[in-house]
Amino acid sequence: MPKYLFGVQPPAFILAGGSQAIVTYKPPIGKNTKIIWAHTLDYDLYLEDLQKPSVNEYKIKKYAVFIDGYWPFYPDYVRMNVKAPVTPENYYPLLCDFFSDIERKTGFEIIIAAHPRSNYEDHPDYFKGRKTIRGKTRDLIRNSEFVLMHYSTSVNFAILYKKPVIFFTTNEMEKFTIDANYIRAYSSELNKKFINISKSFGINWEKELNIDENSYNDYREKYIKKRNTKDKFFWQIVADEIRGNY
C-alpha cells in the first residue's frame, strides 16, 4: 500500500550504499529527496585498515577461515520456536571432516570465525581443537588465504580484500529452502559454484582459489559502494552533504 496513507512522508535524505540499495528496498522518494551515495558500514572498517599496517596477530603463516553461522543454535530460531535447519550431531562432525580434508590437501590451517552471537564456551569442542575466535571476522578474512562459508554478509570483506570464497552446503541445509537459496544467490553473484559436502569434498583448487575480478567488482558496485563516490568515512560523506544543503 502507498506509504503516504500511513503518514509516511518522503525523507529529505536517503543514505544509500551500493547501486542496488534503493532498487531493493524502494524507499519513498519525493521530488525534494536527496540521495546521498555513501557505502555499507563495512567499507568504513576497510578504510580504517588502509590507514594502518596489516598485522597477523595469530602468527599463522597460511590459513583459511570459516565464517561460522552458529546454525544449530542460532538465537533467532530459538526465539521464534523454529526448528534449526541442521542438527549439531550431523553438522559439526561433517564440517570437521571437510576441514581436515582441506588441511591435508592444502597445508593450510582452518580457523573458525565464530558467529558474533555464538556461545561455544557452553558447548563441547565441536571444532576438534581448531582456533575459534569471536569478534575478529574482518581481521581473520583480511589475513587469510581463502574463505569458507555457507553465506554471510561478511562476504563484503572477502570482496574488499580480494579473497577467494568457497561456498558449501549439506544435505540438511538443502532441505531448508530459504537458506539453500541464499547460498545459491551468493555464489551466483561471484560466478562461483557451491559444493554439497554431504556428497563430496571434491574441490577444483586451481579454479576455486582464483577470483573472477569482474564479478567481484560488480558485487562491490551493487552491494557495497558505487563507483566514483567519495572515498571517505560514512559519517563524513553524510556531514558534507548535509552542510552543503543547509
Image: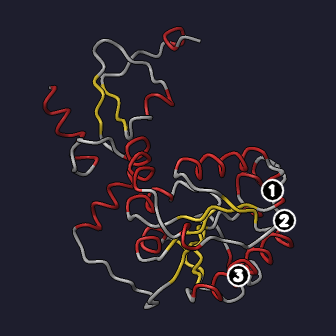
- Tell me which colouring the rendered structure shows: secondary structure
Mark 2 = which residue? 87
Left or right: 73 as drawn, with respect to 22: right
- Mark 2 touches mark 1? (CB < 8 Å): yes
| Image coordinates for residue 241, horizontal then vertical, percent | 19, 34
Q: From the viewer's perspective, is residue 142 above or below residue 185? A: below
Instruction: Identify the amino acid type marked 3.
Output: Phe
Residue 102 percent across, percent down from the top left: 65, 81
Residue for badge 3: 127
- Say what secondary structure mark 1 lies in: loop
Position of residue 151 relative to residue 229, above or below, is below
Label 1 CA crowd tier, 10 Å (few <14, some 14–19, many 20+): some
In the rendered image, which quarter is residue 142 located in?
bottom left
Residue in the image at 59% along x and 76% along y: 112
Q: Which residue is mark 1?
A: 84
Which x, y percent locates residue 8? 47, 16
At mark 2, the secondary structure is loop
Residue placed most toward the observer, 118 or 146: 146
